[in-house]
Image (tube, helix red, strand yellow):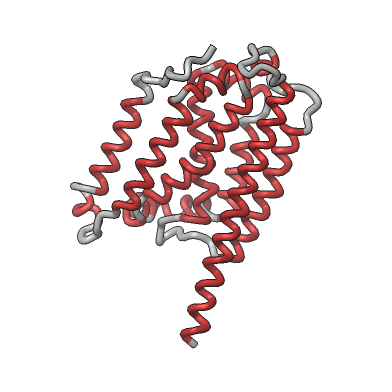
């Protein structure tokens, strides 16, 4: 069973988090004058980056990880949602544009980066990358293998970064999409995610054997009820994110239109 005070302290997790935080501190601190001379340090971006690391550790290092791997599909989906939305968004908000463009805006990278970071590619990678890991055979292999589980969570973060890129990209070379494209992008994402939500929610039996035969962590919550709860979480949280981003996009568009009208 789960001990709620049992947080992961494995060498593969804690040193990795410390290394990422230390590298970010070096790049945005002492090395900033070499990479982007005269660029000020942004405390707000730093707060976003370190918040992303904290939420990622909550998803992967807390007892939620054990619950999601062994007992509850809904706990696993909660992990995925944390990585897809707050972690990925905070990571992008935490990266300074000069740092991103310093890595991506190079002659040999411009063409492939342009192909990958356009809204169509980002949306397709987000939907396909998320849906693929819910195929029963691939999903079960991730639950049974630590390297596959690491690949699953790593690609989930990558899918989240690609989802957010057309919306909040910090890059000048590969900037966010315009308001109309954002609206179409989020609408298509909602339609595609509804199919995934329906696949999980509408199934008449538990899809994944691990959860079908797992001991009941919560009394009275059957495997099929746990699966439907996971489907509700997947659909509801994603819809709220999409609608919130859509509303923010319309607000930004209206504000800019108002300023343009006032200027005329």
Left or right placement of residue 28 versus residue 134 in this view: left
Q: Using the image, determine if residue 82 lies above or below residue 12.
A: below
Left or right placement of residue 52 versus residue 120 in this view: left
| Residue 252 locus on image (x, y percent) | 52, 66
* Along the viewing direction, whichever of 70 and 199 lies nearer the viewer: 70
| Residue 116 locus on image (x, y percent) | 52, 49
Q: Using the image, determine if residue 54 lies above or below residue 114.
A: above
Left or right placement of residue 117 versus residue 34 in this view: right
**Number of callouts:** 0
* Along the viewing direction, whichever of 25 and 127 lies nearer the viewer: 25
| Residue 171 locus on image (x, y percent) | 41, 57
In the current view of this chain or complex, which residue is farthest to the bottom? 264
Q: Residue at x 52, y 83 (%)?
A: 261
Q: Residue at x 44, y 36 (%)?
A: 55
Instruction: Give the quadrant of residue 91.
Output: top left
Q: Using the image, determine if residue 231 lies above or below residue 192.
A: above
Q: Residue at x 63, y 40 (%)?
A: 128
In the current view of this chain or complex, which residue is farthest to the front? 219
Q: Using the image, determine if residue 95 lies above or below residue 5.
A: below
| Residue 110 locus on image (x, y percent) | 43, 55
- Which quadrant would the N terminus be assigned to in this image? top right
Q: Residue at x 45, y 58 (%)?
A: 174
């Amino acid at each position: 069973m789960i001990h709620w005070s049992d947080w992961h302290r494995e060498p593969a997790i804690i040193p990795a988090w410390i290394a990422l935080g230390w590298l970010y501190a070096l790049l945005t601190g002492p090395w900033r004058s070499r990479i982007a001379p005269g660029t000020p340090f942004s405390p707000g971006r730093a707060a976003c980056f370190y918040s992303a690391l904290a939420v990622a550790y909550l998803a992967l290092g807390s007892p939620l990880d054990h619950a999601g791997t062994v007992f509850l599909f809904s706990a696993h989906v909660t992990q995925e949602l944390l990585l897809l939305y707050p972690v990925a968004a905070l990571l992008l908000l935490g990266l300074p544009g000069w740092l991103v463009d310093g890595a991506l805006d190079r002659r040999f990278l411009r063409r492939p980066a342009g192909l990958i970071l356009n809204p169509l590619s980002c949306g397709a990678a987000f939907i396909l990358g998320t849906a693929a890991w819910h195929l029963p055979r691939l999903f079960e292999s991730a639950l049974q293998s630590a390297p596959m589980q690491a690949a699953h969570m790593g690609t989930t973060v990558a899918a989240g970064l690609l989802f957010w890129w057309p919306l909040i990209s910090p890059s000048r070379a590969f900037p966010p999409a315009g308001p109309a494209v954002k609206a179409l992008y989020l609408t298509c994402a909602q339609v595609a995610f509804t199919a995934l939500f329906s696949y999980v929610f509408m199934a008449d039996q538990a899809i994944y054997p691990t959860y079908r035969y797992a001991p009941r962590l919560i009394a009275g919550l059957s495997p099929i009820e746990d699966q439907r709860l996971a489907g509700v979480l997947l659909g509801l949280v994603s819809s709220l994110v999409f609608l919130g981003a859509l509303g923010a996009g319309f607000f930004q568009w209206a504000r800019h239109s108002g300023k343009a009208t006032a200027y005329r």
